[in-house]
Image (cartoon, rainbow, N blue to C red):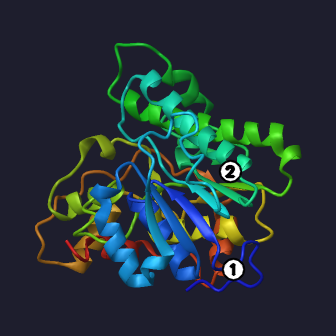
Amino acid sequence: MATIENPAIPKGSTVLVTGANGFLGSHIVDQFLRTGYRVRAAVRDPRKESWANELFGKLYGKENFELVAVPAMDVEGAFDEIVKGIDIFVHSAAVVTFEPEASKVIPVTIAGALNALKAAYSEPSVKRFVLTSSSTAAVGLLDEPGTIVTEDKYNEKAIKKAWDGPPYEPSHSIIVYEASKAQSEQEVWKYHKEHQAKRPDLVVNTVLPNFIIGRSVDPVGQGSRSTFSLILDLWNGKKNEMLAALPRQHFVDVEDTALLHVAAAVLPHVQGQRIFAFADEFSWDRTLSVMRKIDPTRNLPEEFSDGQGQWNVIVASSKAEKLLQELGRPGWTRFEDSVAANVRDA
């Protein structure tokens, strides 16, 4: 359990988490509950996510967890009812359809983020707002390998390229996703800057994780979602040629990423910050090497990609690691441990 002295929001307060059924979202829920907070978890259809009620109710008490419905986050006023009485709002929901047409992805993502922030502004009890952004909001496919990523960098190249019309290149859907994360984060900061004088007590922070791996909170009930499934695919002998062609990435453990959301929500000195969750350099070949150490007899693919170009230089990653240390962790979870956790229940 995280050790927090004099948190900005006292334990026992209620946290609203959107996208709570996702790989990362469910861990955000878990970290807040184990730290001593109550959670209101927003999903599209609570009936389809009954596993979450069963899991979190059993672990932390049914009185500390509830599922609520938000069928469409881009509808105006989508969060106005469920935000009532909460103290922290974590907007983790995202559009991950990987549509190549920008108009089907970017406006929805922006509207969802702004609807969440506006709801936080409208509810006096909300004192902290945390947006789950993405590494791609800062750096992506179109940046030169070895790019130095500072805290004020945005993925302007993706924003410009995303709105190109058809015919679409194979990578265009990824560029559209990158642009959606960059533009939605920019719009959140813009709105907050323009309206902050009306709510000086509301603190806004964002978390930008790179490639997330690690354990699932419930591999049976939740299933294989997001980047969790990509590691499992490799473990099961499948290689993804599209991902092999991507620039070199950094990984981050899913529990570390979730705990950084707690830091953004409750540490008094963390205000108006972009938190860069980039733990260590990662490639598919390195992943295979770790997997062979876990099970030398397993039938795994031959090495097929060590990534493209140099790894980017993430200036603020050590700053994020220090936040984890403030909450009682020794630092970033090791890559080997994250891979092992990802495949443990496969």
- Which residue is painted at 71% across and 60% down in the image? 128
Q: Sort mark 2 into few (<14), some (14-19) or many (20+) by Cα contacts within 10 Å.
A: many
* Any part of residue 142 in sight: no
Relative to residue 38, is residue 90 depicted above or below?
above
Relative to residue 187, is residue 256 depicted above or below?
below
Asked if labels 1 and 2 touch by Cβ distance under 8 angstroms, the answer is: no
Q: Position of residue 106 (x, y in %)?
A: 50, 30
Amino acid type, callout 1: Glu
For the N terminus, which image quadrant? bottom right
Amino acid type, callout 2: Ala
* Any part of residue 135 in sight: yes
Marks 2 and 1, how far apart in space?
26 Å
Q: Quadrant of residue 234?
A: bottom left
- Which residue is painted at 79% across and 71% down in the image? 268
Q: Secondary structure at mark 1?
A: helix
Which residue is label 2 attached to?
A: 120
Give the left or right position of residue 310, taking residue 244 as reference. right
2 or 1: tag closer to the N-terminus = 2
Q: Quadrant of residue 266?
A: bottom right
- Mark 2 or mark 1: which is in front? 2
For the C terminus, which image quadrant? bottom left
Relative to residue 1, is residue 312 depicted above or below?
above
Q: Secondary structure at mark 2?
A: helix
Give the left or right position of residue 46, taking residue 346 as reference. right
The total of numbered circles placed on residues is 2
**Closer to us: 70 or 307:** 70
Q: Which mark is residue 326?
A: 1
Q: Position of residue 73 (x, y in %)?
A: 49, 40
Relative to residue 280, is residue 160 depicted above or below?
above
Q: Position of residue 130 (x, y in %)?
A: 64, 56
